[in-house]
Image (tube, coloured by chain):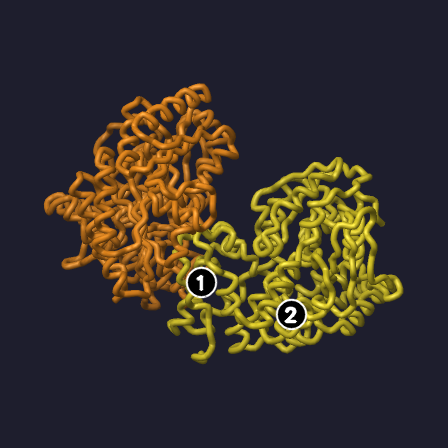
């Protein structure tokens, strides 16, 4: 290991090895092995820094971490697990470059709007024209790894936001104007769930916010960051900070648990006391999840929804952004809803960015546990707050053979239905 | 470990995922929540008595040591594989958790999480009282081996007080049953109590029959503030002699309160010397009357303020201060040495005085909180284990804390066990003959010293150490 490389070694000393993180860790839960626990991983990073263990030995434990950071919420001594994990990921990425395919997807695909649109439109056309179902029937999908096949099977019908449909830039508030907000659309979100973004903006309008959509924004960088690509992440962060700085928004709102977490943690990408750090801090302070703003306002619910609802919190919304109560409050406010909590509700569903593609089997073990807990409350609807979780829950429902019985929706879709926004 | 042993173990455990030998896995089972680091040669995760018997026979054949382990929450080094060999990780063996309400017993396998037993018992209107702070993580097997305690120890005692019977694998790989499922049982030697708290040195617990009691209908909480630590100590005895047995009686000293206020301001006054948190349990009418009486007693003796929780939310709010002590104190420095020296209740004020002197003498960061009602204090020293000079001072201070406790008629351990951390002090408490008689029991049960060696009994010349230097 190159000596110049800095692992978050000092941070590992904050761990008193009490083990309180164990019951909250999804991979410890599924494997039952200390090596796949937060305490185990912190110890391995420490040993790595002390050069008492090889990168090869420690890598699989670090790579199999979902990064849900539930351990941080459970930790009685405030260990900065995210920082420790990130430092190890960056080291591993540097020393053991991942496959070319993954690199291409992450580095070129996600941040590139044209690429996304092309890919999205391609899928949209394929789905519309029945090419996908034809391919499925013909068994063509079988040439892809099981993980890709599984993802393809639950991918929503893609409907790209067409330029002419989104010719607005500023959406005026309905009723008295409270605040001005800039809206962050995300990339996967806007490719697969653009309607949720549209509904989000309409809900914000209904709640009295002036919503602005700016074209210049780019990918938040979360997936690159999780893969240990700090340099590329910083480039994207700078771009987002700079373009949003041009406007004087009270808040920058998103409906994506994972991206939201990345945005609020932008300051950590930069050296403290640097100019970019303080710009990032100002930016991050204004970034909020949509549920925070909507929970504060009074939405005009006009439709009763008589359904049993379970909510699967996004880890990055809950454990990183610490948005815990607002989604529950919002769901419970909807007239007619029978809201039910379930065992281990706050545990990760196994989606975790592209984890469920890269580590398919492990992700499915986590998902199957999640489904056994959710199914006990017999929900009609599972509510999510992040596109990754959304797709994962759909896959979970499909794996249980309950696609007809259980609907998976984003919290925004549920609220939009109750407010009769279509 | 030679390949032969691993091969034989794999014949016993026919599942690759439950026999771990790679470098990262061995590193992950080299520690617990105490200080030592000792990698084992192999980690095995048994899920049946037969498998344990098989592994013990392999160990016997090759004279390789075995160390039973739960979730590794031990603060005394109980499961550390100090001489290498086989770690038996019981955390996957969770298949049995049966409540038999008519007998008021629970039957459990060793990997079951302790809090889950109480949760399950609650469904039948019953309770499993021992509640170590780690109960939501720790396994019952580990609790039985270390004889774990908890805040409810004041009223309900420790783990050993709730064990009716055990299934144990002996050092020869035989299976025995001790005790049974009756509350009264006076047949022969009490092997059940002998095994509980023997820290895995006499036999390996593979099943337990635990006693349950009716669950109290309700709880009530009071917070009492004192500007004099000595008076706070006096108040503890006064409450008990005043005819009231709280379910919990916890204390925080000024340093703990200050740390909590700096960490998360709850509005506690920081000019006080001590804070008592008292939980009463039982019939709601009794709680109301007892809370009133506790308030009177405390004010009479000189408390400056008594706050009684009116709602469940207020109750949680009052206990929040106690919960925040750990995160609050480690903000200063990362290493936390939590001791559990215990003194007779009348000596609590004196123990506080001695702790103050030790703090000044060795110039260490020391805060005191813990289960004052049963004399089980937790002097916590905050240090930085990278600072060897400081750790040497801490070692000396800890030694003196133990001495002080013993001089007052107390004990080395109220609830954490001896493990490897406190072995050098065993003779100080038990005397030469006392320790020798214990050693003879060990030799009779485990003549080849295969079961958890290096625990409880000191090696010749062994001294207390918090560093690997």
Residue in the image at 42% along x and 62% along y = B20
Asked if residue B292 lies left or right of residue A179, the reply is: left
Which percent across, then down, holds residue B255?
34, 47
> Which chain's residue wears label 2?
A
Neighbourhood count class around disc 1 (C-alpha, 10 Å): few under 14, some 14–19, many 20 upward = many
Picture colour for chain B: orange
Residue in the image at 27% along x and 65% along y = B388
* Count of number-bearing discs: 2
**Quarter of the rendering containing residue B130:** top left
- For label 2, the residue is A237
Which percent across, then down, holds residue A61?
49, 65
Q: Quadrant of the N terminus of chain A?
A: bottom left
Which mark is on residue B122? none
Neighbourhood count class around disc 2 (C-alpha, 10 Å): few under 14, some 14–19, many 20 upward = many
Asked if residue B399 lies left or right of residue B76, the reply is: left
Q: Which of B109 and B221 is in front in this view?
A: B221
Which percent across, then down, holds residue A204?
77, 51
Asked if residue A55 lies left or right of residue A405, the reply is: left
- Element type at mark 2: helix
Which mark is on residue A42? 1
Looking at the image, residue A250 lies above or below residue B426: below
Asked if marks 2 and 1 fall on the same chain, the answer is yes
Nearest to the eye among marks 2 and 1: give it: 2
**Quarter of the rendering containing residue A253:** bottom right
Q: The yellow chain is which one?
A: A
- Element type at mark 1: helix
Q: Nearer the viewer, residue B365 or A402?
A: B365
Looking at the image, residue A263 lies above or below residue B222: below
- Marks 2 and 1: CB-CB under 8 Å? no
Q: Gap in Å between the C-alphas at discs 2 and 1?
A: 27 Å
Note whether residue B113 is visible. Answer: no
């Amino acid at each position: 290991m190159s000596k110049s490389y800095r692992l978050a070694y000092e941070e590992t000393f904050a761990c008193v090895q009490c083990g309180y993180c164990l019951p909250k860790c999804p991979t410890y839960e599924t494997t039952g092995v200390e090596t796949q626990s937060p305490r185990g991983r912190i110890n391995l990073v420490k040993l790595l820094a002390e050069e008492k263990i090889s990168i090869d030995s420690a890598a699989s434990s670090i790579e199999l971490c979902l990064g849900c950071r539930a351990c941080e919420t459970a930790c009685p001594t405030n260990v900065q697990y995210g920082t420790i994990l990130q430092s190890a990921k960056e080291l591993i990425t540097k020393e053991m470059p991942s496959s070319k395919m993954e690199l291409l997807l992450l580095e070129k695909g996600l941040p590139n709007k044209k690429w996304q649109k092309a890919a999205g439109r391609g899928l949209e056309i394929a789905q519309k024209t029945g090419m996908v179902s034809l391919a499925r029937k013909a068994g063509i999908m079988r040439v892809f790894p099981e993980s890709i096949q599984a993802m393809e099977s639950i991918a929503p019908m893609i409907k790209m936001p067409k330029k002419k449909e989104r010719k607005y830039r500023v959406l005026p508030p309905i009723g008295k104007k409270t605040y001005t907000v800039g809206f962050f659309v995300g990339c996967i979100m806007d490719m697969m769930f653009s309607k949720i973004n549209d509904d989000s903006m309409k809900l914000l309008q209904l709640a009295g916010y002036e919503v602005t959509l700016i074209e210049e924004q780019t990918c938040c960088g979360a997936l690159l960051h999780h893969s240990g690509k700090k340099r590329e992440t910083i480039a994207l962060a700078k771009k987002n900070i700079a373009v949003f700085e041009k406007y004087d928004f009270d808040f920058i709102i998103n409906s994506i648990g994972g991206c939201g977490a990345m945005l609020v943690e932008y300051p950590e990408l930069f050296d403290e006391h640097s100019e970019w750090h303080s710009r990032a801090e100002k930016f991050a302070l204004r970034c909020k999840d949509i549920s925070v703003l909507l929970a504060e306002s009074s939405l005009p619910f006009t439709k009763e929804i008589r359904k049993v609802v379970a909510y699967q919190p996004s880890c990055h919304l809950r454990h990183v952004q610490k948005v815990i109560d607002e989604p529950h409050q919002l769901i419970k406010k909807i007239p007619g809803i029978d809201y039910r909590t379930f065992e281990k509700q706050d545990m990760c569903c196994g989606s975790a960015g592209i984890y469920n593609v890269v580590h398919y089997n492990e992700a499915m073990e986590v998902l199957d546990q999640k489904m056994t807990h959710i199914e006990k409350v017999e929900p009609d609807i599972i509510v999510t707050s992040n596109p990754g979780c959304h797709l994962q829950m759909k896959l979970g429902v499909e794996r249980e053979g309950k696609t007809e019985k259980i609907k998976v929706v984003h919290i925004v879709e549920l609220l939009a239905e109750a407010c009769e926004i279509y | 470990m030679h390949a032969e042993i691993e091969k034989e173990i794999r014949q016993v455990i026919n599942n690759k995922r439950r026999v771990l030998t790679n470098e990262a896995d061995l590193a992950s089972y080299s520690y617990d929540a105490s200080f030592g680091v000792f990698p084992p040669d192999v980690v095995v995760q048994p899920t049946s008595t037969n498998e344990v018997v098989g592994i013990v026979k392999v160990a016997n054949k090759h004279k390789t040591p075995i160390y039973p382990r739960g979730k590794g929450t031990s603060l005394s080094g109980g499961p550390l594989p100090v001489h290498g060999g086989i770690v038996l990780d019981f955390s996957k063996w969770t298949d049995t958790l049966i409540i038999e309400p008519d007998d008021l017993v629970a039957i459990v396998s060793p990997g079951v999480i302790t809090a889950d037993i109480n949760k399950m018992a609650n469904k039948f209107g019953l309770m499993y009282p021992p509640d170590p702070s780690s109960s939501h993580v720790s396994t019952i097997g580990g609790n039985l081996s270390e004889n774990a305690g908890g805040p409810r120890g004041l009223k309900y005692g420790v783990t050993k007080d709730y064990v009716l019977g055990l299934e144990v694998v002996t050092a020869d790989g035989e299976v025995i049953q001790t005790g049974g499922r009756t509350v009264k049982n006076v047949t022969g030697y009490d092997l059940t109590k002998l095994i509980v708290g023997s820290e895995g040195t006499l036999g390996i617990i593979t099943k337990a029959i635990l006693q349950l009691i009716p669950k109290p209908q309700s709880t009530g909480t009071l917070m009492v503030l004192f500007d004099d630590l000595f008076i706070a100590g006096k108040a503890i005895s006064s409450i008990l002699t005043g005819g009231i047995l709280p379910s919990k009686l916890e204390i925080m000293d000024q340093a703990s309160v200050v740390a909590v206020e700096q960490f998360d301001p709850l509005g506690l006054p920081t000019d006080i010397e001590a804070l008592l948190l008292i939980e009463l349990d039982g019939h709601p009418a009794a709680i109301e009357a007892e809370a009133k009486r506790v308030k009177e007693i405390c004010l009479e003796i000189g408390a400056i303020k008594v706050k009684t929780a009116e709602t469940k939310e207020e109750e949680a709010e009052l206990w929040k201060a106690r919960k925040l002590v750990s995160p609050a104190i480690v903000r200063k420095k990362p290493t936390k040495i939590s001791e559990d020296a215990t003194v007779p209740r009348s000596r609590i004020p004196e123990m506080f005085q001695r702790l103050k002197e030790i703090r000044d003498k060795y110039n260490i960061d020391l805060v005191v909180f813990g289960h004052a009602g049963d004399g089980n204090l937790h002097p916590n020293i905050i240090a930085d284990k990278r600072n060897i000079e400081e750790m040497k001072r801490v070692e000396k201070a800890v030694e003196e804390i133990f001495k002080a406790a013993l001089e007052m008629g107390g004990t080395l351990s109220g609830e954490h066990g001896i493990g490897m951390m406190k072995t050098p002090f065993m003779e100080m408490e038990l005397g030469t003959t006392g320790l020798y008689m214990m050693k003879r029991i060990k030799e009779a049960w485990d003549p080849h010293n295969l079961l958890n060696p290096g625990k409880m009994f000191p090696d010749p010349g062994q001294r207390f150490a918090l560093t690997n230097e």
